[in-house]
Amino acid sequence: MDAFFSDLVKNVIANYPLEVKHRFFEYIDEKKAMWPIDTNVGEVFLKKVLIDEGYIELMIYAIDHLRDNGIFTPEVLTTKLGDGFVKKQDEYFMLFEAVNGRSPNFDSEEDLQLIMNGIASFHKASIGIELTNEQVSSIESNWKKDLENKFLKLTKWKEERTKLKHQNEIDKLYLKNINSVLMQCEKALAIIDKCIGEALEDTTKTLCYQNFDENGLIIGEDGNLYFLNMNALIIELPIHDLRKILNIVMKKEKNWNPKLMKKIIIAYHETNPLACLQYKLLKADLLFPHLFYDVFSAYYESMEIIIVDPSLISKMKKIITLELSKERAISTVFSQTNEALYGR
C-alpha cells in the first residue's frame, strides 16, 4: 500500500471512536475507493465519496429516514464530534457498518421477487421524506427532457454517420436500424405528451435508487435486501427504477420476455401499488430505446479510440434484436397487467 495513502486513511480513521486492528490494515486497496477495516467494534467499511458536502448531508438524512421506515441499508458511523464524514486532502470519506451476504442473482425468480419487494418498499418509505427546496432542486431529474435530449442525439448521430464517406461496420449497423429506433422514440414521447395532457391520477415522485449494479445491492445473511450505495439518489417517478431493473433483466434474454416482465411488475405492485397512469408512463419509458442509446453512445461519445472488434458488434446486434422485439411484447403485457391489477 502506498505510504502516503496509508497515512491518509489512518488519519481519517483517527477521527472515529474505534481502534483499528493493524494486522489487517495492510490489505486495504486504494484503487477500489472502498476498504474493509477490522476494528474493536467489528468490521466496518471506509468509502471515499465523490460528492460534495451538501449531497453528503442529504444522503445521510435520506439514509436515516429510510432506515427509520424499515429499509435495510448500512448505518453511517459518526466521528468523535458527531459528523457523518471526514474531509482530508480535499477528499471526503465516510464510514459504514459492514453487511455480509451475497450479490443478488437477477436470473433467479426468487431473488427478483426480493429485489422488487425491496425497491417497492424503498419508494414507499421515501414518500414522506421532508426536503428543502434547495435539496429537491439538487437531485430532482427532468425525465421527459432527458428522453428528448437522447432522441436529439440519436438523430444527430444519424445525420453525421450518413454524411461519412467511409462508414465502418458500426456506422452501417447504426444506420440500418436507426429509423426503427427513432420511431420507438416518437411513440414513447407521444405517450408521455398524452399523459401529461390528461387529468393526472397520481404522479407522486419518490427517491429513486438507480444503483442496481453488482456493488449496489446485497442479500444479507439475515435474508433481507440491503441498498449499499446512496450516492446516485434522484427524485423522480418510481417507474424510473422499474425501467432500469426490467432492462437489466431483459438484457439477459434473447428477446423481450413478456411472462417475466409481467411477474416483475406484479411483484412490485404487491408492495407499492401505482396508479394506472404511472404504468402508462412506464410503458413509454420501456418503449424508449435506452439500451440502444447506451451501447452506441458509449462508442460515439467516447474520448478514446475503441477498436471495432467482433465482440462489440455482437453486443450491439444483441441489443438491437432485443429493442426491436419489445414493442409488441410490452403492449401485450400492459394490456394483461391492467386486467390483473385493476380489473380492466
Image: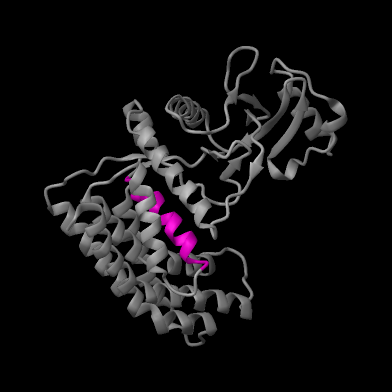
Q: Is residue 220 left or right of residue 293?
A: right
All told, the count of numbered labels is 0
Q: Is residue 192 left or right of residue 4?
A: left
Question: Going 75% across and 31% down the picture, which residue do you hit?
Answer: 37
Question: Going 26% across and 51% down the picture, which residue do you hit?
Answer: 278
| Front residue of this view, candidates 160 and 91 | 91
Whether residue 238 appears in magenta in the rendering, the answer is yes
Percent across and percent down for residue 61 are 46, 25
In terms of image quadrants, where is residue 28? top right
The chosen color scheme is one colour
Report the predominant secondary structure element of the magenta stretch. Answer: helix
Q: Specify the segment rendered in magenta.
A: 237-252
User: Vertically, is 296 above or below 41?
Assistant: below
Question: Going 28% across and 69% down the picture, which residue do you hit?
Answer: 332
Please indicate, yes or no, whether residue 241 appears anywhere in the rendered image.
yes
Q: Is residue 305 left or right of residue 254?
A: right
Please indicate, yes or no, whether residue 238 appears anywhere in the rendered image.
no
Whether residue 182 appears in magenta in the rendering, the answer is no
Percent across and percent down for residue 321 are 44, 78
Percent across and percent down for residue 297 are 48, 66
User: Vertically, is 191 above or below 228?
Assistant: below
